[in-house]
Image (cartoon, grey):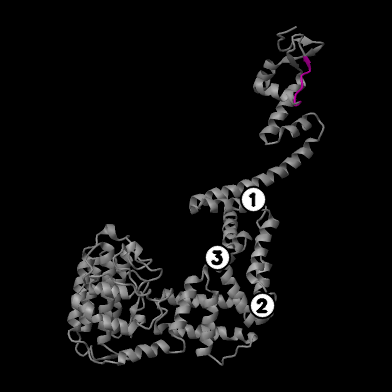
Amino acid sequence: MGGLRLGRVYDDTVLLSIGELAERTGLSVKLIRHWSDIGVVPPAARTPAGYRLYDAEAVARLQLARTLRDLGMGMAAIRDVVNRERGLAEVAALHADALEVRIRTLRLQQAVLRSVTDRRPTTEELTLMTDLARLSAAERNAIIHDFVAETMGDLDHSAYRQGLLAVTPDLPEEPTAEQVDAWIELGGLVRDPALRAAMRRMAAYAAKHAPGDPEAAGEHDAGDLTDLWVRRVTEAIGAGIAADSPAADPIVAGIVAAWLPSQSPTGFVPGGDGVEARRRLLEQLEIAADAGAERYWQLMCVINGLPVRPSIAAAGQWLITALRTNPEPGARDASVAATLAEDDTAPAGLLDGCARVLAEVGALVAAVVPDQMDDPTPCEGWDVRALLDHLVYENLMWTSLAEGAPRSDFTADHLGDDHVAAFRSAAAATMAAFGRPGMLEERFGPAPGWRLVEQVVIEMLVHGWDLATATGRPTDLAPDVAEATLPAVRAIYGELPRTPGGSFAPEREAPPGATAADRLAAYLGRAVGRPPSERAAGWPATERNLRRTGP
């Protein structure tokens, strides 16, 4: 009876050989034999020679088995279904649950692989990321609770501690790639000793100054207060007001006035804006100003699907610097006025020196080619075009002051399509305004007019040095003028805080043989002798508007 053909009858039943069954189902003979051996599709009979024969039901069983296999179901479950030992719906539901777990695991593993590409972690870091991706929701919460417990220590009654514990990472059933990335980053962040120390400081401060209910402030909502001062500081930054200038003081005064009522529940009543109030606000900002802590809360918001507050680090640094510069109302203004009053006599040859510096900077401007406009400069965040625009604007602005009609279009484009013509026109207007009879002796606030000329010289020397460095030109700008300017720069700006948010980075050491302009640049925080892309010190190495610090 061997070699039966499709449709032939064997014991009154139409039977198929394994080859015919393979042809009918599209499965391989080898696979059908394997599935037959494990009981998924047992033979209906055998030929006298021992070859397997299958009935019509085997076709349906194999088609069902193939469908379930394509869905990822295991062969043991498939065998139970096709043998009707378990219901298809029951097995499908169990399998769907298993697939859900697998899908979430795959998403987390995918996020790890993406992070490997973005972060280039070490082998140790990759192991940590992989471990974090495998954690359950309960294990994720346990990590945060352990972090809070270890960080807070014995500060059991801290409202800050309660706030930390009230927010735990809760990944949704179908997290986005951003949420998964945030969880992996958070899991690594909470292992950072620096973050633990920063949050411990915040908690200790809160326990000491506000140990009660965090809602005790009543109508003075902390979020609204933060929005207010960030908005005012952002507006000041947009207007070109340097944090360490006299012009920052009114901004500080307004923020202090809005902040003071929030301190009443803590028992702090300084009696208005003054040294004690500003010291207290500065203390709070310095304790809260931690990038790691800010990132912690941002990641928590991402994971929990909440709105993420934009970083306020830059605004915070601005306000910290403004408070340091103005520890009491009018402090910086008084300091500048005292410095300017020390000598009412214009230095000999000041106008000629200004003309020389403008001419040399003009030559640097004229040498800039279009391909250089996007190149970096020593001023962080400024490319060559932005630097050129600033050089033009400084001339326009000081000219407007000398003419009694100060400009306020700081954010406008002052360069246009012809940077050379723009600078030459602005420089010519500067010299015409400064050359007006009596201008050097005329009073502009507490300062004589020659101080305006001095500020243009400083601006052009500093930012001319930036331009020369960025475009690969010599930095030996007007050596005698730069040498004579150094004492004035030290006197006017020497007391300013050299911190992020301020106008100047910490003073750098100038290398042997440095030019006078190099030494001036190093004093104002430039890294002399390094490529432009490496010279930014983490914040603008000199303020973008020296006028706001000077007269």
Q: Disc 1 residue type?
A: Arg
Q: In which quarter of the image is the C terminus?
A: bottom left
Residue at the top extreme of this rendering: 1
Q: Residue at x 51, y 86 (%)?
A: 278
Q: Answer with the quarter of the image where residue 459 lies.
A: bottom left
* Residue 95 falls within the magenta-colored stretch: no
Q: In this view, does 51 lie above or below 76?
A: above
Q: Which of marks 1 and 2 is nearer the N terminus?
A: 1
Which secondary structure lies at badge 1? Answer: loop
Q: Mark 2 points at which residue?
A: 214
Q: Disc 2 residue type?
A: Pro
Q: Position of residue 435 (x, y in %)?
A: 19, 84
Which mark, residue 134?
A: 1
* Residue 40 falls within the magenta-colored stretch: yes
Which secondary structure lies at badge 3? Answer: helix
Q: Quadrant of the N terminus?
A: top right
Q: Earlier in the sequence, mark 3 or mark 1?
A: 1
Q: Residue at x 73, y 40 (%)?
A: 95
Q: Answer with the quarter of the image where residue 503 lies.
A: bottom left
Residue 218 appears in the rendering: no
Q: Where is residue 493 in the image (x, y as percent from the top left)?
A: 34, 82
Q: Mark 3 points at which residue?
A: 295
Q: In this view, does 353 lie to the left or right of 539?
A: left
Q: Position of residue 340 (x, y in %)?
A: 31, 89
